[in-house]
Image (tube, rainbow, N blue to C red):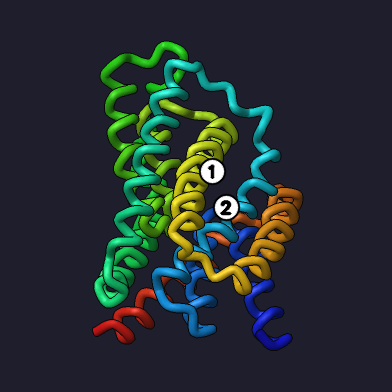
Amino acid sequence: MNLGTILFLTFAAALGGALNSVAGGGSFISFPALLFMGVPPIPANATNTIALWTGAAASGGAYRKRLDVPRRVLVPLLTASVAGGLAGAVLLLNTPAQTFMRVLPWLILGATLLFVFGKRLTGGRQSALGREATTGALAGATAFQLFVAVYGGYFGGGMGIVMLAMLATLGMADIHAMNALKSVMGFVINGVAVVTFIVARAVYWKQGIVMIIGGIAGGYLGAHYAQKLPQAWVRTFVVLVGTGMTVYFFWKSY
């Protein structure tokens, strides 16, 4: 790789890590950057996952004191995250690249729409996932999280928005606690996918190492300065990028 490629991928990963730490949608930046640099779609997804996973690890500490979820709630959700993340990663590795490129624009479109309309899914209801969570609410949340985890292991763009919407509709009212739980579940989902991709030798390590460095820097700085940034600006930027990538990949694939 030349210096221009290194700088481009480092910046894309840093921006992706920063966006994930603030509002989500980082894959809309870092994944296309790998494609633009000539990395095939499936290795690009695998490499992007490991880069943003390390970025999430760097930023996750910001919410560590907010994770106040009872074990009877946390264990089923994390179990679903592990199972779904593994299933999604295996599905990706067994999907022909041409098929993935045809599915990709629909995934990005769906993630963008979820990002835009995610707040409307909250419905203003009180959380049902507190310490008094009913068995039915917990079962519903676990089933929903399993589907989210499969999507996360397969692609994952907009996954955080989906999880926040699910947690809000199922009873969590504290946005910081929601972000804490979302961060843990996302870390588990992507962690399982990362192990799967490494074992399958699907990661392009030259590009991956560069993006890991950028992702860590962006994730840490994004978490550090998150309270100082106007989140409306970040959300608008993510929506614009998501819309642009949707149009581009529909044009590219069809």
Q: Is residue 11 above or below residue 222?
A: below
Image coordinates of residue 240 in percent, x first then y, are 47, 72
**Residue 14 placement, left or right of 94:** right
Tag 1 near tag 2, CB within 8 Å: yes
Q: Is residue 83 above or below residue 45?
A: above
Viewer can see residue 2:
yes
Mark 1 secondary-structure assignment: helix
Q: Amino acid at mark 1?
A: Phe
Residue pictured at 69% horizontal, 48% vertical: 58
Image coordinates of residue 184 in percent, x first then y, are 54, 37
Mark 2 secondary-structure assignment: helix
Q: Is residue 101 above or below residue 38?
A: above
Q: CA distance from mark 1 to mark 2?
A: 7 Å
Residue closer to the observer: 137 or 192 = 192
Q: Is residue 62 above or below residue 158?
A: above
Quadrant of the snapshot with the C terminus? bottom left
**Residue 110 placement, left or right of 5:** left
Q: Amino acid at mark 2?
A: Trp
Residue pictured at 52% horizontal, 76% vertical: 34
Viewer can see residue 236:
no
Place residue 81 in its image quadrant.
top left
Q: Which residue is mark 1?
A: 187
**Residue 17 placement, left or right of 78:** right
Image coordinates of residue 187 in percent, x first then y, are 54, 43
Q: Which residue is mark 2?
A: 53
Quadrant of the snapshot with the N terminus? bottom right
Place residue 252 in its image quadrant.
bottom left
Q: Earlier in the sequence, mark 1 or mark 2?
A: 2
The image shows a total of numbered marks equal to: 2
Residue pictured at 49% horizontal, 29% vertical: 173
Image coordinates of residue 69 in percent, x first then y, are 52, 21
Residue pictured at 71% horizontal, 63% vertical: 213
